[in-house]
Image: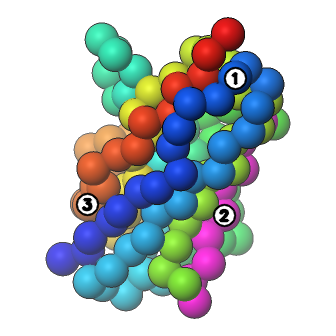
Amino acid sequence: QVQLVESGGGLVQAGDSLRLSCAASGGTFSNYAMGWFRQAPGKEREFVAAISWSGGSTFYADSVKGRFTISRDNAKNTVYLQMNRLKPEDTAVYYCAASSRLGNWWTRPEGMNYWGKGTLATVSS
C-alpha cells in the first residue's frame, strides 16, 4: 500500500509560481509512474502531468505544456510539479497519484492505483 502526501499549495497571483511536492511511503517508489491531476470546483478531475518510473519520459496536458514541469527524485521518494506563469484557470485541488500500469494509462484517473488527498492552489487575478 502506497501513501502519498502532497504539499506546496497556496494563494498566489497570476503570473507567479508554485512548486508542489508529493512524498511517497509504503512501497517501492521507483516501481511506479507518477502523475498529477487537478480538480476545479464543479469540474471533473483532469490530467496535468505524468512521469515514468525512471523519470526519462514526461507527459503534459496541452493546457500546461511549457508552463509546468514534472520531475521526481527516487532517492527521496518524491515527485514535484513546478508551476510557472500561473493563470486563474489553474485554480484547483492538485492530486498526486501513482500507477503500476503501462504508459497509456498514465493520463487517465482510472489508470492510477493510489492517490493523495490533494493540495489547493488558488491563483488570483
Residue 66, picture quadrant:
top right
Q: Secondary structure at mark 3?
A: loop
Gap in Å between the C-alphas at discs 2 and 1?
A: 24 Å
In the picture as drawn, the residue positioned furthest to the left comes out as 1
* Residue type for callout 1: Gln
Give the percent coordinates (x, y) of residue 50. Answer: 55, 53
The reply to whether discs 1 and 3 touch (Cβ–Cβ < 8 Å) is: no
Q: Quadrant of the C terminus?
A: top right
Q: In this picture, which residue range is highlighted in magenta? A: 67-75
Name the residue beneath numbered marker 3. Answer: 113
Which labelled disc corresponds to residue 13? 1
Which residue sits at x=56%, y=30%? 11
The crowding category of the residue bearing disc 3, from other C-alpha atoms within 10 Å (few below 14, some 14 to 19, many at least 20), is: some
Left or right for 19, reference 91? right
Q: Nearer the viewer, mark 2 or mark 1?
A: 1
Q: Nearer the viewer, mark 1 or mark 3?
A: 1
Please tell me whether residue 61 is drawn above or below residue 115 in the rendered image: above
Would you say the magenta stretch is mainly helix, strand or loop?
strand
Earlier residue among tags 3 and 2:
2
Name the residue beneath numbered marker 2. Answer: 71
Residue sitting nearer the eye, 52 or 79 = 79
Gap in Å between the C-alphas at discs 3 and 2?
A: 19 Å
* Residue type for callout 2: Ser
Q: Secondary structure at mark 1?
A: strand
Query: From where the camera sits, is residue 103 visible?
Result: no
Gap in Å between the C-alphas at discs 1 and 3?
A: 33 Å
Q: Is residue 119 magenta?
A: no
Left or right for 20, reference 96? right
